[in-house]
Amino acid sequence: MDVFSIAFVCTGNRFRSPLAEAFVQRLTLGLPVTVESFGTLPLENALPLKEATEIALWCGISLSSHRTRYVNNASLEEVDLLLGFEPAHIQQAVVDARAPRERSFTLGDFVSLLPAEGAAPDDDVVKRAGSLVAAAGDRLAEFPKPTMSAMRDPFGGSWKLYRQTASDIRDLSVTLVERLFGVTDAHALPPVPQKLGRARKTLWR
């Protein structure tokens, strides 16, 4: 069976990309889809940020098995879709990991380039998704000087910024899966609570 592969890239592979990876994995359960994530910093086998771990748990997801991976050590020439959060992520993945330029986008840009009505019914999920990626690349190429969108790195910021960033990633992941694969049921991935506070230490004993 053919499989559609997605790779997310952020800076440290400790917050944005591991959350996106986990969210999309949850939303595509049962589909022939693989998801992985990497960082542009030369950091291997580090844990996700505690903020990512806490927020993921509120969405019913554990990041306990996640360890950081350096994108320069990856071979991404065969990936079906490469999604970054800043233009620099795309550039490094294309240059140093050989990700296909025509299938590499920032997450926000790619979602906006997909048809708003979502994927048309098709028994071949992989073929349909591949066609949508190709069409998105063609649309992006129509812009003479396209400006890539960026999602700010929350590292070192406030708890509110971490929470809002995670909420944005969750919402974009839901829209991505709906438009790319036709999956419209987001109940498997609860939204990030708007008034989510930090977990008390007693909860972690």
Image (tube, rainbow, N blue to C red):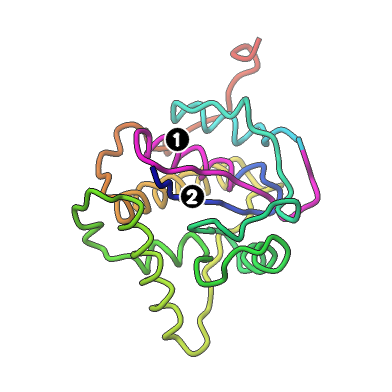
Name the residue beneath numbered marker 1.
195
Q: In the image, 202: left or right of 131?
A: right
Quadrant holding the N terminus: top left
Name the residue beneath numbered marker 2.
5
Residue 199: x and y in percent read 58, 23
Q: Which residues are magenta?
A: 16-44
**Residue at 28% of width from left, 50% of height from top?**
124
Res. 92 image quadrant: bottom right
Q: In the image, 181: left or right of 107?
A: left
Mark 2 Cα-neighbour bin, 10 Å: few <14, some 14–19, many ≥20: some
Residue 152: x and y in percent read 60, 58
Q: Magenta stretch: residue 31 in it?
A: yes
Quadrant holding the C terminus: top right
Q: In the image, 82: left or right of 190?
A: right
Q: Looking at this rendering, what residue extends furthest in the front direction? A: 1
Q: Amino acid at mark 2?
A: Ser
**Residue at 52% of width from left, 64% of height from top?**
106
33, 198: nearer the viewer: 33
**Residue at 43% of width from left, 44% of height from top?**
170
Tell me the mark number nearer the camera, choosing from 1 and 2.
Answer: 2
Q: Magenta stretch: residue 98 in it?
A: no
Residue 178: x and y in percent read 30, 50
